[in-house]
Image (cartoon, rainbow, N blue to C red):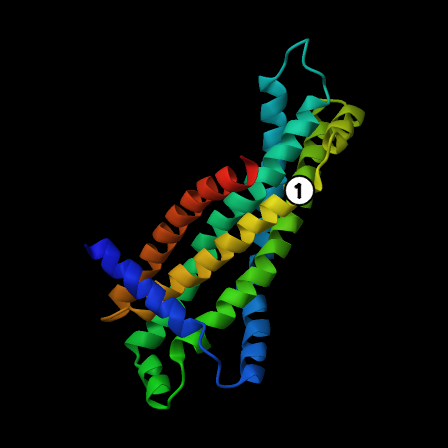
Amino acid sequence: MKLFYHIGKYFILLWLIVQKPESASIYRKQIIAEMDYLGLDSLGIVAIISVFMGAVVTIQTAFNTDHPLLPAYAIGFATRQAIILEFSPTVISLILAGKVGSRIASEIGTMRVTEQIDALEVMGVNAAGYLILPKIIASVIINPALVIISMFLGIFGGYLASAMTGVVPLSNFMYGILFEFSSFDIFYALIKTVVFAVIIASVSGYFGFHTRGGALQVGHASTKAVVFSSIYIILFNLILTQILLA
């Protein structure tokens, strides 16, 4: 029953979030600030992880597909598919759930326990919309850009691994990268990324907004935000994969 209680409160919060804003200009400024705060600050960790994971995927694929009947370009093809279809949209979203989700929950949770949200509500401001909606919109805009960068860097990491280790000739690797490329793969990855962005921002905002107590409870809210965001990302990854690729 507690699960349904939280689901109900979550959808009530979503309804409050999408109410008409008091001032669209303030929301525009907030969205731009949140794009920098939540997205661009994560570019470094996304870049580092993407390059090294692309290299690891290439090397692992090369060592586990060493068969005379398997063409050499299959390594590049497998690397491209793994990065575009699964690694960049899903793994990067899980990383952002930990980095961005905990930040959102702790920020809003601190505002709740210090009664700043209560002050906004007393002034007649839609606190849920003012605090959470810009974060959702900013995540929906910036997360796909981070994922696209991750795709390029992941493939580049595979290219570097191929060049430095010689596990596969560069010509074969590049042929595999381009072999039967479908733009739908990119579309599929970005659809998942947008859904995951909404999950990260809204679920983290929910736990922060309903924090009660003090600093210890803010920490608990941040932990719950990361855990539940990650669970829902994995769940919706399965659902969207079945819907879009079935």
Q: Residue at x 58, y 25 (%)?
A: 60
**Of the residues shown, which amino acid type is indicated by label 1?**
Phe
Q: Is residue 42 left or right of residue 131?
A: right
Q: Is residue 23 left or right of residue 180?
A: left
Residue at far left of view: 1
Question: Between residues 174 and 130, which one lies in front from this camera angle?
Answer: 130
Q: Position of residue 122 (x, y in %)?
A: 32, 89
Question: Between residues 51 and 10, which one lies in front from this camera angle?
Answer: 10
| SS category of the residue bearing label 1 | helix
Q: Residue at x 72, y 34 (%)?
A: 159
Q: Residue at x 58, y 83 (%)?
A: 25
Count numbered badges in the picture: 1
Q: Residues within 10 Å of mark 1 (few under 14, many from 20)?
A: few
Which quarter of the image is occupied by the N terminus? Answer: bottom left
Q: Quadrant of residue 61?
A: top right
Residue annotated with mark 1: 184
Q: Position of residue 95 (x, y in %)?
A: 48, 49
Q: Position of residue 230 (x, y in %)?
A: 40, 48
> In the displayed structure, would residue 100 be above or below residue 153?
below
Q: Residue at x 69, y 28 (%)?
A: 76
> In the displayed structure, would residue 229 be above or below residue 31?
above
Residue at far bottom of view: 123
Q: Is residue 65 visible?
A: yes
> In the displayed structure, would residue 19 be above or below residue 67?
below
Q: Position of residue 86 (x, y in %)?
A: 55, 39
Residue at far top of view: 68
Q: Is residue 167 visible?
A: no
